[in-house]
Amino acid sequence: MAITTHDTNTELQDRAILVSLVTDKIKRTGIDPELSLQELVQLAETAGVAVLDVLRQNKETPDSKWFIGKGKVEELRMAADGLGANTAIFDQELSGAQVRNLEEALDLKIIDRTQLILDIFAGRAKSREGIIQVELAQLSYLLPRLSGHGKNLSRLGGGIGTRGPGESKLETDRRHIRDRITELKRQLDEVVKTRELHRERRRKSGAVQVALVGYTNAGKSTLLKQLTDADVYIENQLFATLDPTSRVLALPGGKDVVLTDTVGFIQNLPHDLVASFRATLEEVNEANLVLHVVDASSPMREEQMEVVQSILQDLGAAGKPQITLFNKSDICDSGQLEMLPTGEGYLKISAFNPEDLTRVTELIEDELAGDTLTFRIPADRGDLSSLLYRVGEVLEQNVDENDVLYTVRLNKEDYLKWGYMVADFVDPQ
Ligand SMILES: Nc1nc2c(ncn2[C@@H]2O[C@H](COP(=O)(O)OP(=O)(O)OP(=O)(O)O)[C@@H](O)[C@H]2O)c(=O)[nH]1
Ligand SMILES: [Mg+2]
């Protein structure tokens, strides 16, 4: 498959050749390396890099010194010379030694996928929380790559353009970086505590929370904007959103919920980034309902959905009630539309179609309303009746000899959490 690149040829821009090495290990993961490479082009362009060319190599295992084979290094040098590139971006993660060897041999800035993603995040971070989290992730990535080669510190940390932790900060020793990591973690702890207080307040106020999650560029912020008139940043680029934004959404029945937009996910999301962004990502755990927004027009739709589910799993939010919104149906071809799963909890939409937006709010309302069930509780089980009052909305209560019949509306999440205690008492009627 051909990859379209755009040579914008601005002097200030980094000019890069992308490199992808497909090893047997990568083949076993089932991730299509060509699609991954297309995504790398998008990532590079999002970071403001001009992509000049793409080199591919198949090899059983990576070369420990050069990552790619020696012959391929030569090919890269010729391509870089010919096209005037100053950067090579690798689709797979490199070791510190490989970066140094390649930099010295080629006189190019060497960047891997992880560092590119970290750079994009660094450029996007606006809130104090976001800035702390990104710097922490960058330094955690950098630290194990510094072994004994202090002189290359500044180049390693430089990243794309002038972003990244910055040269001045990095021209110090490892101990300094460790101190900085400790300090950032301390600051992050404060942020986590503040967030915890906010959550507590929200919990007490009984606000029902709905989280928009999904692969980057799926249309989460667009949906938040279309549904609530929120003034949020929307761009056809990866990781447009970093900080969670919440807005009140009025449901058709009149009830209000809090709708939160979150940072997008991507395959091979750097481990350090996930660890650092835990405070932000854990907002998803507060949600009563998760709206999984999918770009239905993407050739990587299925892979992207799997990535999202596995990150939700890591966050401990996989068991939450979920609605899958197949977005961008307006630009899907008929084949793509036919392939989409249908049924309960799935909706094909376009964020720009008002009728679809109404269907979304109706479905949210349905999901949150949950089920109405009748329980037959023995009169001496006060513990169970008080549980029903605590977790559900008791609509009716009737005494029947030694039992009390409760008609209760329970939302799905609460039923998943508490239902097992009263499951034996559901009255078939
Ligand atoms: N055709 C079409 N484009 C859409 C639709 N929804 C969103 N888009 C476009 O998709 C791009 C990404 O939208 P965003 O809302 O920024 O996506 P996001 O999921 O918030 O992305 P990140 O914040 O980067 O994770 C923008 O160019 C939107 O205009 C849709 O239903 N149809
Ligand atoms: Mg967004």
Image: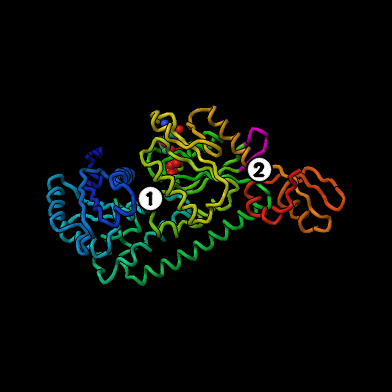
Which kind of residue does numbered mark 2 sit on? Gly
Residue receiving disc 1? 267
User: Which span of residues is magenta-colored?
Assistant: 250-257
Residue 252 part of the magenta segment: yes
Determine whether label 2 and label 1 are within 8 Å by CB: no
Name the quarter where the C terminus is drawn: top right
Residue 313 location, x and y as percent? 49, 54
Element assignment for label 1:
loop
Q: Whole-Å distance between the Cαs marked 2 and 1?
A: 33 Å
Residue receiving disc 2? 370
Q: Nearer the viewer, residue 125 or 106?
A: 106
Q: Is residue 291 left or right of residue 340?
A: right
Say above or below: 97 vs 212: below
Disc 1 within 8 angstroms of ligand 1 (CB): no
Residue at 43% in and 29% down: 330
Mark 2 or 1, nearer chain start? 1
Say above or below: 56 vs 61: above
From this viewpoint, which residue is outermost toward the front?
Answer: 428
Element assignment for label 2:
loop
